[in-house]
Amino acid sequence: MGFLLARADRVLLATGERARFDSVAAAARALETGATEIVVGALPFDPQRSAALLSPVDFAFTDGPWRPELGPLPSTRLVREIPTQAEHVERVTTLVKLIGEGALHKVVAARSVALAADTAIDPELLVAHLISRHPTSNGFVADVGSGTLVGASPELLVSRRGNRVTLRPLAGTAPRRSDPDADRAEAERLLASTKDQEEHSYVTEWIRAKLSTVCSELTVPSAPVLTDTPEVWHLATPIEGVLADQSTTALDVATLLHPTPAVCGTPTDLALATILEREEDRGFYGGAVGWCDRSGDGEWIVAIRCAEIAPDGRTAIAYAGGGIVAASDPDAELAETSTKLRTLLGALGVQT
Ligand SMILES: C=C(O[C@H]1C=CC=C(C(=O)O)[C@@H]1O)C(=O)O
């Protein structure tokens, strides 16, 4: 499969490859000149790295939700944690100290786990399982050259239809609990948490500043709302804007906004440099997955709750991160990444 974006209301399936673009500029040029009707693919976490965008041979939009057959997935196990849990706690402790020095306000610390399967993991089947467990998330499969990125992300970077843009950034997390009273208490604690409100506000302020350069109207609610997945509660802010110039495309807005402080930090340059210096390669985790057509419409999803499956299908790396601010507790941050990793690991039946 070339590319799949399965959202609750609409599904895009694209197959074949007419041309590949390793830069946003090349993809944008192909759209402008009419060389392609649509561009699909993924943007890496590090904007300096090569993108994995392509012009498909065929593509089709259908109404969601996507409900394919759910065959069994291969038996899969966790073979390595990168870095180890103890190292992640140590890194977060150092980052909290760094934030205390004053220049850095927020940075997202991520870790990954290496997985091995008995037989090849079919990306389409894995995303089908992810979506059946997370029906409100955005399921995706994207060929990123080095492998196949598969995930179910709850976070919309941007959707553009005509001159309207819609965004739904997330930041601030609490675990779901099986007991309904305890679960509600977690949600209320999250909504009232000044630490999580701070973590969230860096994202909405960045988006407000960036969007105000391209929007003539912008609505950013002053306080976030709660949203949930089967594993976590999040703080979310639904944002809407009207583009000042109809020639601003979904791809333009995605590249203007990426990387938001939901995956990087504040200030962006310092947070990005800190992540690139201290973390293993994120590849396309923390990037964006989506499409843009010739009219400029498109949808870009933040590439989280995902894994990259190697070309042989037998190994994969799943990623998760969390925003670190001055008041973050390193052990709680480790637990948060473990909870977020359960999206992928749960679908694959991996015991942790
Ligand atoms: C970076 C991730 O989540 C982001 C999205 C929602 C909440 C987040 C948080 O609370 O830290 C993160 O900003 C991830 O899942 O790997």
Image (cartoon, rainbow, N blue to C red):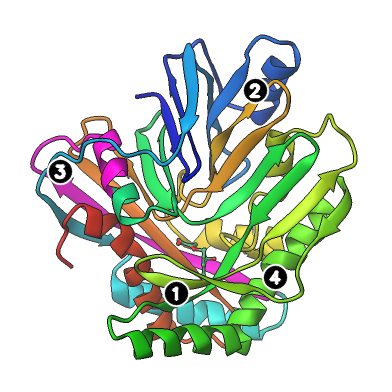
Earlier residue among tags 4 and 3:
3
Q: Residue 122 in magenta?
A: yes
Name which of mark 3 and mark 1 comes first in the sequence: 3
Q: Which residue is mark 2?
A: 27
Q: Quadrant of the C terminus?
A: bottom left
Q: Nearer the viewer, mark 1 or mark 4?
A: 4
Residue 45 seen by the camera: no
Residue at 42%, 14% in the rendered image: 16
Looking at the picture, how far across and down is residue 226, in whole percent?
A: 55, 74
Instruction: Locate residue 103, reporting x and y percent.
Output: 72, 76
Q: Are marks 2 and 3 in contact (CB under 8 Å)?
A: no
Q: Which residue is mark 3?
A: 73
Q: Nearer the viewer, mark 2 or mark 3?
A: 3
The span from disc 4 to disc 3 (Cα, nearest Å) is: 39 Å
Q: Is residue 81 visible?
A: yes
Identify the amino acid type marked 1.
Arg
Q: Is residue 181 above or below residue 245?
A: below
Give the magenta range.
104-129
**Tag on residue 91?**
1
On screen, 253 above or below 79? above
Name the residue nearer the viewer: 257 or 153.
153
